[in-house]
Amino acid sequence: MFRYILRRLLQMVLAFFGTTLIVYALTFAGQGDPIQALAGERPVTAAQRAYLTEKYHLDATGVGGFFYRYFDYVKNLLQGDLGQSLTGRQIGDILQAAWPVTVKLALIALAVAIIFGVSAGVIAGIRRASIFDNSTLVLTLLVLGIPTIVLAPLAQYFLGVKWQLFPPTAGAEPTFYALLLPGIVLGSLSLATALRLTRASVAENLRADYVRTARSKGLVKRRIVTVHVLRNSLIPVVTFLGVELGNLMSGAIITEGVFNIPGVGFNLFRGIRTEDGPLVVGIVSVLVVVYLVSNLVVDVLYAVLDPRIRYE
């Protein structure tokens, strides 16, 4: 296991540098005039333009200039310095303020997916072809067919504005109750996928040979399901939820934008809209680490859920 983790850590390092290089190239290659984009319609003086150009090495052009800026960024990144956005704020300070909000939102969404999705998936897998099973399949198919950009405004209008069950927007310092509706919206797609994945896995394991052997030994159905079937069925579900956690931690740009949540996704969208390259690359670099760590944790959990799995 130690050798496997060490090998995965080395792969994570290569994946991190490769991903950040690609993101850095795509971000700065597609920029027009980032300084003017930041200012909008306001004029930028020659002194301001010269200062910002020198500060962010925007005068370095060509392939050599690109790699100069990239390696300068990586050097600062390894020292824990994410740099400054074009607004002059430290990116680390922006993330420090945004992460708690996004973490709360992601945990609510993940809890919704686990509590309702996995639980309903287990019941549907045990009671295949029942009314509950058919109903959940139709509902999850409906949820999967509605994009978040449509679902979020609908939920905001009906549950927040018309029926006033939840606050329509979260605000600058959102409470748990204010994040509940966007958390449900954010976790709805994960809930539907987790439900269908759990249902298929439970139904498949119920037909396995070890289940027939357990029944022939006289074990009660509840013990067969909770001790044997559920443990083996959770392996693909844990894989999905582990990867999905990294996706939820990205803040879901659409959800945070619709509900005005000052999280990571909201700041990432703002950086893209204003062509704030340092802010975009800084946030994406941190999100890459979240994805890589989530995948490593999932791989290690395999051996915990199934003792037959061992890493040489």
Image (cartoon, rainbow, N blue to C red):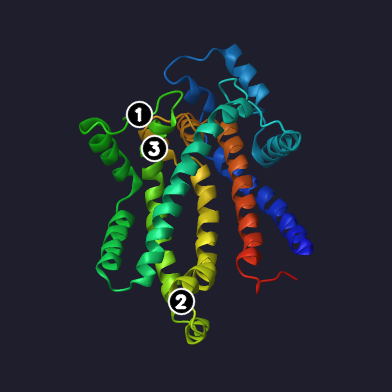
**Left or right, 213 with reference to 122:** right
Q: Is residue 52 above or below residue 64?
A: above
For mark 2, does the 10 Å Cα neighbourhood hold few (<14), some (14 to 19), or many (20 or more) residues? Answer: few
Q: Which residue is mark 1?
A: 169
**Hey, what amino acid is under mark 2?**
Val
Q: Residue at x 41, y 59 (%)?
A: 119
Quadrant assignment for the N terminus? bottom right
Q: Which residue is mark 3?
A: 180
Q: Is residue 156 above or below residue 49?
A: below
Tell me how far mark 3 sits from mark 2, CA to CA. 39 Å
Label for residue 50? none
**Hey, what amino acid is under mark 3?**
Leu
Which circle's residue, 1 or 3, is located before the other in the chain? 1
User: Who is closer to the viewer here, 15 or 64?
Assistant: 15
Residue 183 on image: x %, y %: 41, 41
Q: Nearer the viewer, mark 3 or mark 2?
A: 2
Q: Residue at x 54, y 60 (%)?
A: 238
Residue 7 on image: x %, y %: 75, 61
Q: Residue at x 54, y 68 (%)?
A: 231
For mark 1, does the 10 Å Cα neighbourhood hold few (<14), some (14 to 19), or many (20 or more) residues? Answer: many
Label for residue 220? 2
**Left or right, 95 with reference to 229:** right
Q: Nearer the viewer, mark 1 or mark 3?
A: 3
Q: Could you tell me which secondary element the residue under label 3 belongs to?
A: helix
